[in-house]
Amino acid sequence: MSQRNYQLVRYKVNRNNFEVMVNPGAVMKYRKKTITDIQEVIYSDVIYKNQSKAEQASEADLSQGFETEDVMACIEIILQKGEVQLTSAERKAKVEKKRLEIINFIHQNYVDPASKKPIPVVRIENALETMKFKPDGNIPTDKQLAKLLKKLPEYIPLKKMIMSGALTIPNKYIGQAQNVVHKYCETGKESWGNAWTVEVSIVPGVYDNFIRDISSATQGEFNFNIDGQQSNDNSNNNNNNNNNRNKGKKGKKGKKRNR
């Protein structure tokens, strides 16, 4: 068996360890009754105490662990109650899933302190690669983040925060815009007049999606003035002849036009 094309199912009982080799992916199908023939599940009908050392369980071991020496009856119990050891591909997929969870959490909840904008995913990925961070598929995400976030600021500036500010929407777009706002934001004080102005707070990671959808709902005519930075006046970007306003690009103030 030089090439590993099987999985191990490990079961511990009465201080004894029992292992059975099974076909990859077959155990879960067997438990869900997608496969009903046990012979389609097992790679070998040998029960081991330590498969890596080729140490087989004796009849006395089986009797002590399962109160029977019937090998197939013992295997049935192991398949139903044992812990399935992951294949190499499954372990890699589990680690990759954990890596994406960590990156997504940082992207969703942290911003660049200077711009107060979400940190791009690519920038987070590059920082993790530079610091040679290796996620563990078996350790909870929050525990890994607790350690990671102590070192990550050495590689990229970041700050945990909720983005907040004043959003202004022309009255003609209120119907469409409110659906978008309530989808992404928590809302506060509102004022009405020639336009609807509402205080909103939003998780940084959904900022890009919010801007995309609110732009679509208002045909680009909106103003989002994020606290602590210049306004994101999208109406100026779409209509250069609009009222004098500060442009939000790169946080620079626009020149006041004389009429």
Image (tube, rainbow, N blue to C red):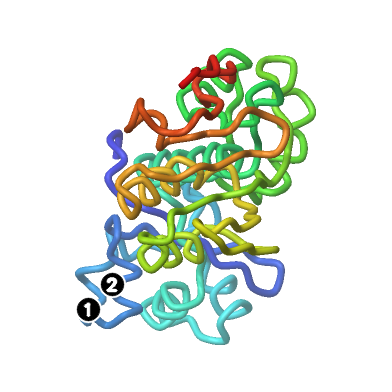
* Discs 1, 2 touching: Cβ within 8 Å: yes
Q: Position of residue 155 (x, y in %)?
A: 67, 15
Horizontal side, residue 144 vs residue 21: left or right: right
Q: Which mark is residue 154?
A: none
Q: Which of marks 2 and 1 precedes in the sequence?
A: 2
Q: Amino acid at mark 2?
A: Lys
Q: Above or below — where is 157 with respect to 54?
A: above
Q: Position of residue 98 (x, y in %)?
A: 52, 44
**Viewer-proximal residue, 131 or 191?**
191
Q: In the rendered image, which residue does mark 1 sit on?
A: 34
Q: Above or below — where is 45 with respect to 225?
A: below
Q: CA distance from mark 1 to mark 2?
A: 5 Å
Q: Position of residue 68 (x, y in %)?
A: 51, 85
**Viewer-proximal residue, 197 or 21?**
197
Horizontal side, residue 86 vs residue 151: left or right: left
Q: Above or below — where is 119 with respect to 127?
A: below
**Viewer-proximal residue, 82 or 207?**
207
Q: Quadrant of residue 225?
A: top right
Q: In the rendered image, which residue does mark 2 sit on?
A: 29
Residue 19 can be seen in this image:
no
**Viewer-proximal residue, 115 or 137?**
115
Q: Position of residue 167 (x, y in %)?
A: 56, 50
Q: Quadrant of residue 128?
A: top right
Residue 51 can be seen in this image:
yes
Label 2 crowd (10 A; few <14 / some 14-19 / many >=20): few
Query: In the image, what residue occupies the spot 40% across and 51% down?
Result: 214
Return the residue found at the far bottom: 67
